[in-house]
Amino acid sequence: MGIVALFTLFVPGCAAPPQVDPVPERTAQPVAEYRIGIDDVVAVSVWRNAELSVTGPVRPDGMITMPIIGDVRAGGRTPAQVAEVIRGRLSEYIRDPQVAVSVVQLVSHTYLTRVRVTGAVTQPISIPHRPGMTVLDAVLAAGGVTEFAAPNRTTLYRKQDGKSRAYPVYLKKILYQGELTTNFELMPGDIIAVPERRF
């Protein structure tokens, strides 16, 4: 059985370190559960009432503006939830309104799905996630490790089920020995932390 070293991050005011697991699980959030964010462009369609249909970005306060009913909170809600709120408020003016809300441009999503590489790398980076991207791809995009790095103590942090989990990455073996066991495929929002050597 291999020995997995656990490293504790001491940050004032923070909770206990995330759970460490040997192999990260790949999870995907259903599209239906996507929650609208600031600057996302949404389209609201009211059937047979084109004059009430609008398309525009979500404002910094999380609101969109609708004819007749005014401001409606969209930020933090799913498209279905926003449609239901609009339907309820329009029903005071229109009989049985049929409302559909869709996100036509995912702006906030691009920030939430970025992959970040920090620590002892040539250039710490935040880059868009790409399908099939691996730990090695991200580290090479960051210019590789510095001479002060301790690559075999690298950690991959991933949020799963609302919890932050940590996975050991043996980056030295990946870079110099071609051992790809821990060259995990990355998920949106992953963080790769490369620590410095202890002197």
Image (spheres, grey):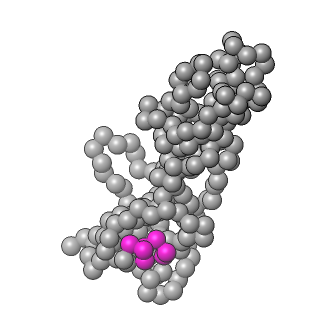
In the image: residue 101, left or right of residue 73: right
Residue 8: x percent and y percent? Answer: 36, 56
Left or right relative to 1: residue 173 = left
Q: Is residue 96 above or below residue 146?
A: above
Q: Where is residue 132 in the image (x, y as percent from the top left)?
A: 60, 70
Tell whether position 6 is magenta: no
Q: Which residue is drawn at 65% across and 24% down?
A: 86
Task: Give the magenta range.
Answer: 136-142
Residue 92's quadrant in the figure? top right
The residue depicted at 30 percent of the width and 48 percent of the height is: 11
Q: Quadrant of the C terminus?
A: bottom left
Q: Please name the residue shown 36% across and 77% down the image.
A: 143
Q: Can residue 7 be seen in this view?
A: yes
Position of 89 relative to 185 (above/below): above
Query: Between 133 and 54, which is closer to the camera in this rendering?
Result: 54
Q: Residue at x 30, y 77 (%)?
A: 146
